[in-house]
Amino acid sequence: MQQWWKESVVYQIWPRSFADGNGDGIGDLAGIASRLDYLSSLGVDVLWLSPIYPSPQDDAGYDISDYQNIDPTFGSLEQFDALLAAVHERGMKLIMDLVVNHTSDEHPWFVESRASKDNPMRDWYWWRPAREGMNAGDPGAEPNNWGSIFSGPAWELDENTGEYYLHLFSRKQPDLNWENPEVRQAIYSMMRWWLERGVDGFRMDVINFISKDIKLPDGHVHDGSLYGDAMPYFVDGPRIHEFLQEMHREVLAGREGLITVGEMPGVTVEEAKLYTDPTRREVDMVFQFEHVQVDHGETRWDSRPLRLRDLKAVLGRWQAGLAEVGWNSLYWNNHDQPRVVSRFGDDGEHRVRSAKLLATVLHLHRGTPYIYQGEELGMTNAPFASIDDFRDIQSLNHYAEAVSTGVDPDAVLAALRVLSRDNARTPMQWDDTENAGFTTGTPWIAVNPNYKGINAQAEIADDDSVFHHYRRLIELRHTEPAVVHGDFRMLLADHDQVYAFTRGYSSTELLVLANFSGEPAAIEVPEADRWQGTELILANYPVDAAEDIQHLALRPWEARVYRGR
Ligand code: TEU
Ligand code: CA
């Protein structure tokens, strides 16, 4: 079985904020095309494009109104074909974002579905009458108590027919009913259409949400929550494996060279094994969330300081769980997460070192690494001053709901500054000219003012930059089989400051040591005599080769990779 994607690094482009080709302030395909040489100099293998389809942009394109076209804001199908060819010419691949848990409410399928109760497409979505004994529109008359992931109830009343439709995300993102075989066939045929156009696979948005418990029962209301917890009724639901196997048969089987990744909030290690066991023919890898929740408190909006031991425990458990069967994605960032150097590193004095450390630790794990645009520059969270600076629907809805229930607006803002998805969505910082070289117009969201110092042009020119460190890590994955195939052994699991592990493959062994703090960290290197005098293949400080590594004092945010046999 061909598993080229184990040796690959994926780069995620969030088109709206990557590069603007026509000066309207919004990134587009022309902009991406103009930056392909940059991506190929970084050395990445696969580009993943967040949605570029026609969309009302209620959720920045994750609300799709036409699956088989390009939104004019981003370009045209002709431009897309040219871009795909240019990606392939450079030896890279390109995968599309597949968003099929829901459509836009402006998608023709939903327009039909809502037209009348007896419309042939009525059953393509989840329609339900008001709760037994209540009148549609009364407070609490929703069919069940589920809350939307973007605040408010998960049900919207459609006045036209007096029934409610389910939307796990915004009210402009009605959930598709995968129980209906016509829905599934329509999706498979759309997927084949993209593959026949030449795309190399799919990143599948919340794909483990598509099979719901058809009884749609009320969820448990946790303390302090306004709605019931619906996760148990749609995460890894009853028919999910059947649906993914069917999709594989109908769309993917018999085609060579593809990559599929299932974005799966709430997935467990045990389920992930089933999703990614190659003999089961579902998806190539999962994209799980546990390690980006270790600093969450009761809710996703309440953040607490990282405890390194928790992070090691989570990532270590995933490494062990998928050691024999299955495959994971490795990521710190995407378009939904705050910037990792601000989150788990130090975006002040130690920005460059901590960004390199985070990259080193992640890329030396077993799995396929993902780089989110700007991460390779060590881009940071943004200094949002007021709620008017935010654009993301999840952040804006949360602000409105929290403030309306009496929470202090400044406290809500403080939480948004730390965890809002808009931190990831400020424009890519290309150079030190106006608007960071992202656009000649007015950017749709403000550029981070730190672009004068943090930008691609400056980092390309500096051999010691975060950019070149990422480039070296990608090269290492391409040349060192232990990075791809090596087994993973966690060391010093209880250490509060140091993340340490080995990767062993055939006669090679790699040792990774990383001090996740701004203080020196003293460690006893396990089996130090085996490592003394071995080759230091990557570091973020100069190291004296004669240093005694048995009793090591790692400097602030120091990371080292040794290669022994
Ligand atoms: O995200 C899945 C998801 O559950 C997110 O809501 C994520 O958990 C959250 O943003 C973190 O608080 C995917 C997409 O990546 C996201 O951009 C979309 O908004 C969402 O699905 C709906 O399509
Ligand atoms: Ca544009």
Image (tube, helix red, strand yellow):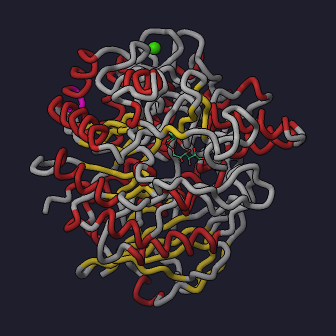
Name the residue: 68% across, 60% down.
295
Q: In this view, does 318 lie to the left or right of 217?
A: left
The spot of residue 70 in percent (x, y) is 34, 20
Whether 88 is among the magenta residues is yes
Residue 429 shows up from this direction = no
Height in image: 374 above or below 73?
below
Name the residue: 29% across, 50% down.
260
Q: Residue furthest front?
A: 133
Q: Is residue 168 left or right of residue 1?
A: right
Q: Is residue 59 left or right of residue 194?
A: right
Whether 228 is among the magenta residues is no
Which is more toward the observer, 472 or 8? 8
Please provide the residue range marked out in magenta: 86-90
Q: Look at the image and tell me in which quarter the N terminus lies.
A: bottom left
Q: How many marks?
A: 0
Residue 432 shows up from this direction = yes
Name the residue: 38% across, 78% down.
534
Residue 502: quadrant of the picture: bottom left
